Amino acid sequence: MSNLKLRIEKHFETLGHKLYHHRLKTILFVFLTVSALISQIPKITVDTSAESLLRKDDKSVLAYNEFKDDFGSSNITLIGIQSSNVFSNAFLQRLKSFHEDLEKEVPYIKDITSLINIRNTRGENDTLYVDSLLDQWPQTASDLKKLKERVLQHPYYVDNVISRDGSLTAIIIKTEAVVIPQEVSSEEFEDFEETAIPDIMPDKDEEKKHYFSEEENQEFILAIESVINRYDAPDFDIAMTGGPPVSEIFDRATRKDFSISFVLTTAVVIIFLIILFRRVSGVILPFIPIYGALFATISLMAIFKSPLTLFTTILPAFLIAVGVADSIHILTIFYRTFEQGKSKEDAIAYAMGHSGLAIVMTTLTTAAGLLSFSYSELAALASLGIFAATGVILALIFTLILIPPLIALFPMKRKQKRVRKQSSRMDRVLLFFADFSYTHPIKIILISGLVFAVTLVGIFELRLSHHVMSYFPDHMDIKHDNKLVDDKLKGTLVLIALVDTKQEDGLYEPDILKRIETVTQRLKTLRYKEIYVGKVFSIIDIIKETNLALHDNDSNFYTLPEDRKTIAQELLLFENSGSDDLEQIVDIQFSKSPITIKIPYVDVIYIEKMLEKVEKEFKDVFEDRAEITMTGLTSILCRVLPAAQRSMVRSYLIAFVVITIMMIVLIGSFKFGLVSMIPNLLPIIMIMGLMGLSGVPLDMNSLMIGSVAIGLVVDDTMHFMYNFRKYYGLTGNVHEAIRETLFGTGRAILITSLVLSASFFSIMGSTLKSSVNFGFYTGMVILAALLADFLLAPALMTILLKNRKSPGFLEVEQNQNLTQTAVKN
């Protein structure tokens, strides 16, 4: 094993010489490769929707796609307008203009509903009429008063387009479920609503259609905002919320945070590089391979059509921080050797031989931790794992092949006095840790055990959470708008229960309709913590309204007919009245119908429990009379959180096993490989335990802390163990091996850890609170791991090896030539 490692180190040294001599060819090759990739960056998209989190073949996504094929999108935009007098002529005239401008100027609208055009079902002379509420405009104060009374008493209007107190009215917009490009002929799609999406066009046109995407959503919301800006006024106070605006604002925050993390991390790394190297070359050289790897990675995401998501906002900060660590390890050795009098070529070749294998191993452990995400049930998390691992490997490759040529081209002078003065202070700190950990190993281990025991309790206090509104800072309008509309209209989220009778015209059956009525009444009393059912919409609303209208608006007839024939006749009358409302709640065979349940906007962890209760109510009521499927975006969100939890547990286990195996291979001992993982696991348990004790929930981002951190913190442990192995093998003295290790590679470990932690702390400048928490606690894990590597790792080695007279588990080949080579290096 020692022979092999020494040969590998020699190969890295030879590589350094070759790259130094072929500098121009190497740089030109990398430049052309990255330039070709960068041209794809403008094609990168952003998608933070619930559907994008899961894989395309996930059952809940497929079920929702089937639902959209039959009934259109369940994703609605709610525009609430507050006024001191909603039922004044001036307000209604302004509302009408606002409604009409939205309908005219906003693309991708499937349906728009407000007080202006909400259905008005009425009967005259045994004839059913279904028109718009304000087809006949109120002319007098008496008309306005009657309108107000009617609206506030109508069960379909209240908590739908008007609040119970009449102070807020809403415009409800549904978007198209499927976007069909203009160049595709309309004849191909004249029956598309009656046909499943995969069959609505020939294969040659398959790529031309797609479900409503984030790109269309951005265009849709921008158009709405443009209209709102013209109408918003003190007594026409507009608030917008719902799935599309929340998604678009989240996308904007994601794009902003992506840029912020890039700028702040770059600034942080520059500051540390200046402090560490005090050279222009020490600042410029690391960024060339890092930026090359970052831009290449983003380009690959664009090429493979992988959008930026909630998870990938951390990518710039992560790759810059991790990538610069490789350069720091090489340049630290290079500058120290260069100051000792070696030429640039010999110094960089020596640095490559000294650190090349170690940074390859640390990169592989980081990549292993990230690739553990690739098995996630969440497509967005798997994408992060794949492309972050790709970026880390590209950063390693670019660092190894670019640093020697760049050093060859960059003019440098020796600054020996300054370096010695700077180094001496840092050396004293490092040697203090070496001596302290060697002389007080038992105390360090006992204190570490105590910390482990206390914080382990906090692990069991951790709770899951996914509340998108809590991610937005308090000053953002969407947070206030959502709360206002949510409170006034008794909810802004919807659960969809699809009732499938499994037979044609099954919805004509009185028994089925009575069961829908029964479950509706039961749902209205259902509660879980702060969640309640604000309103339920279903086919029985239309049937009751029709029955009422056909009986001279006698309130005693706001009921369901008793026989199948009457039900069928009334639905036929309604369908022939000109209203298209029925199309949205029944399929063409009258066998399936969605029931829409409106609930408040709360944490998904609570919605998940409420969803279970709702589903149980449906199954209890319908028994075997119909098949019940819970679907819609809210149901998909409920699927995401447990999937994320399972994925993270799997990811932690995979990362731990793979990294442990790599540590065992590097050290050459099963026992000591396992022991070396203690300084890596303790900081993660400690910080996550503190999160639990502090009441900080595990959201979609903070769930990643463990898997991301273990791939990072193990790097420093690996550098420590790699060098400790070398020096202990040469001297057989634990204390001397610890001192030489921290004196040699300790400086690079210290700086890379500070750079990594500061880079993650820079993510705290993000807009989204989920990113802020992730940045802070991941940074804290890295700092805790640094202390563990400087104190706990040496203490463990001291306890295990102190009384041994020979290298034992770290024996090197007794070959004098190889030993002399190692000593010289």
Image (tube, helix red, strand yellow):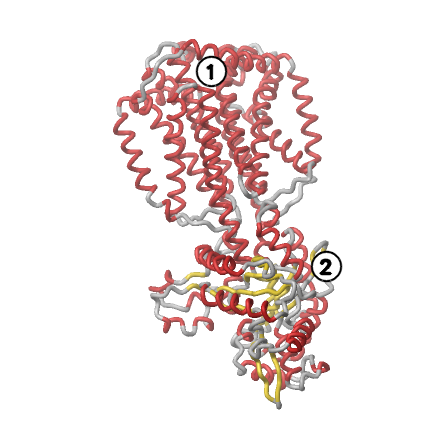
Viewer-proximal residue, 456 or 560?
A: 560
Q: Quadrant of residue 543?
A: bottom right
In this rendering, would 86 be left or right of 413? right
Q: Residue at x 45, y 42 (%)?
A: 386
Q: Quadrant of residue 790?
A: top right
Q: Residue at x 60, y 78 (%)?
A: 139
In this rendering, would 412 be left or right of 646? left
Residue at the disc numbered 2: 527
Front position among marks 1 and 2: 2
Considering the numbered disc 2 on the image, is that residue within a helix, a strand or a loop?
strand
Q: Position of residue 714 (x, y in %)?
A: 53, 28
Contact between labelled residues 2 and 1, with CB atoms less than 8 Å apart: no
Instruction: State the quadrant of the C terminus.
Output: top left
Q: Residue at x 57, y 36 (%)?
A: 706
Q: How crowded is the residue under tag 1: few (<14 C-alpha within 10 Å), some, or many (20+)?
A: some
Residue at the disc numbered 1: 812
C-alpha distance separating marks 1 and 2: 69 Å
Q: Position of residue 368 (x, y in %)?
A: 48, 36
For residue 35, the mark is: none
